[in-house]
Image (cartoon, rainbow, N blue to C red):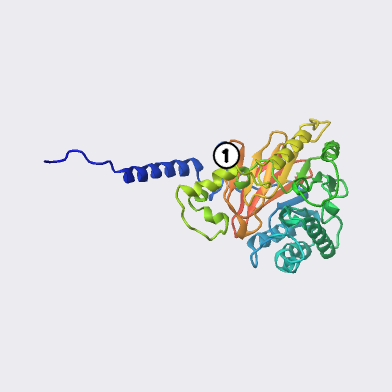
């Protein structure tokens, strides 16, 4: 007698379900911008270099997270070329994580020649003003020896550079510290913060967060354009902002080592989802300490006076994310993320509605101030790529 009933192939159903789940995960995750991303409303003219007829008054070159450079790092070579165009009117600002993986701790200070000196050499060789601010890795990645490691790095940098105000804020202070450039007839006010001070859970100089915010509000009261410098961004579409591309879901082992391409379907999504929704690293924007920092800084920025009484331009510039991002802000006019100074450290980046430009690539940002009052932002990438994005921030 023939049997007309066959047992269902549950194994096939499970495999099919897993494939569907994985497809949904990878589709929702999206792709990192390995090619330059421009907001749809960005005109073609802003997607390439343009001639500037104005007379340069001062130039700031912004880059961070350069603490693990390759030999003959292309970013630093291009940085030097830009700095020497008009060295007397240029400052290079290093936005933290100047020395990986844990700053100048006793067991790592011998690595300064390999990790920190190449950045210092650009400043010394060209003869420009260099300003270094601290990041979380400079505080020994948040470990107990962070404060001593920070002081050691400050001393090392100040001994290497003969100028003034090369490491701010000094002494492990959270700041804020104001610096107007150039010294004669300044065109911009820099306000420097040590944002890792807010997140560090071990020994550090005592100061109330309320006092920091009150002092920041007072320093925002100027008619000059203002650029606030901190290591940690207020917003990001990279891993620290909870954005992960499909590679993070399919190859989660790359979070341990960049070269570790081991596919782990389905289960691999546990890490990015857990990091975004459940387990919050203190270095991620979604964590309670970091979110509090963002809330407090935005509260301060929201108090600024409108022009003509107040500043005509307010920018917050940071590193931390190893990518290049230009975002329109709410409490500030622009949010700059320029943390791609080392080829070995570049990470994925996605985009949001307020993203004007994003790229998973090394590079830095230049902010030029002209004698007619105009301000020009440019995103510069090495190895002959040149300027990939520019925008006049004032007209």
Query: In x, y percent, where is residue 214?
Result: 85, 36
Residue visible at 32% across and 43% down in the picture: 10
Element type where label 1 sits in the image: loop
To which residue does mark 1 refer? Answer: 39
Residue at the outermost left position: 1
Determine if residue 71 is in view: yes
| 67 in relation to 299, above or below | below
On screen, residue 18 versus residue 276, left or right, reads left
Determine if residue 45 is in view: no
Question: Residue 389 versus residue 284: which sits nearer the camera?
Answer: 284
| 252 in relation to 357, above or below | below
Query: In x, y percent, where is residue 31?
Result: 50, 46
Q: Check the picture and name the quadrant holding the N terminus.
A: top left
Question: Residue 259 versus residue 202: which sits nearer the camera?
Answer: 202
Q: Check the picture and name the quadrant holding the C terminus.
A: top right
Residue at the outermost right position: 184
| 192 in relation to 331, above or below | below
Residue visible at 40% across and 41% down in the picture: 20
| 85 in relation to 44, above or below | below
Question: Residue 287 versus residue 300: which sits nearer the camera?
Answer: 287
Residue visible at 80% across and 33% down in the picture: 304
């Amino acid at each position: 007698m023939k049997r007309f009933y066959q047992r269902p192939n549950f194994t096939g159903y499970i495999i099919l379900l897993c494939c569907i789940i994985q497809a949904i995960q990878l589709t929702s995750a999206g792709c990192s911008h390995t090619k330059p991303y421009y907001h749809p409303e960005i005109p073609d003219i802003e997607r390439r270099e343009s001639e500037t007829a104005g007379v340069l008054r001062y130039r700031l070159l912004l880059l961070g997270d350069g603490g693990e450079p390759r030999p003959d790092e292309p970013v630093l070579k291009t940085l030097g070329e830009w700095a020497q165009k008009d060295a007397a009117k240029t400052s290079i600002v290093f936005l933290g994580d100047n020395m990986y993986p844990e700053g100048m701790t006793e067991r790592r200070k011998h690595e300064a020649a390999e990790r920190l000196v190449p950045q210092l050499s650009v400043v010394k060789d060209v003869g420009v003003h260099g300003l270094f601010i601290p990041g979380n890795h400079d505080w020994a990645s948040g470990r107990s020896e962070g404060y001593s490691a920070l002081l050691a790095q400050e001393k090392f940098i100040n001994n290497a550079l003969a100028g003034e105000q090369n490491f701010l804020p000094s002494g492990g202070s959270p700041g804020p510290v104001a610096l107007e450039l150039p010294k004669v007839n300044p065109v911009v006010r820099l306000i420097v913060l040590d944002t890792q001070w807010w997140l560090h859970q071990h020994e550090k100089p005592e100061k109330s967060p309320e006092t920091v915010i009150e002092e920041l509000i007072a320093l925002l009261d100027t008619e000059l354009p203002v650029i606030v410098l901190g290591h940690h961004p207020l917003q990001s579409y990279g891993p620290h902002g909870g954005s992960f591309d499909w590679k993070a879901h399919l190859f989660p082992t790359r979070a341990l080592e960049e070269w570790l391409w081991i596919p782990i379907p389905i289960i691999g999504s546990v890490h990015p989802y857990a990091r975004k929704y459940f387990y919050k690293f203190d270095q991620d924007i979604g964590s309670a300490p970091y979110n509090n920092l963002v809330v407090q800084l935005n509260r301060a920025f929201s108090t600024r006076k409108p022009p003509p009484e107040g500043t005509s331009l307010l920018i917050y510039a940071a590193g931390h994310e190893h990518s290049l991002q230009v975002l329109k802000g709410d409490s500030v006019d622009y949010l700059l993320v320029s943390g791609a100074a080392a080829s070995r450290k570049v990470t994925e980046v996605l985009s949001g509605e307020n993203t004007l430009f994003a790229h998973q690539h090394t590079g830095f940002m230049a902010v030029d101030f002209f004698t007619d009052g105009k301000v020009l932002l440019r995103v510069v990438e090495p190895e002959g790529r040149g300027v990939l994005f520019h925008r006049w921030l004032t007209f």
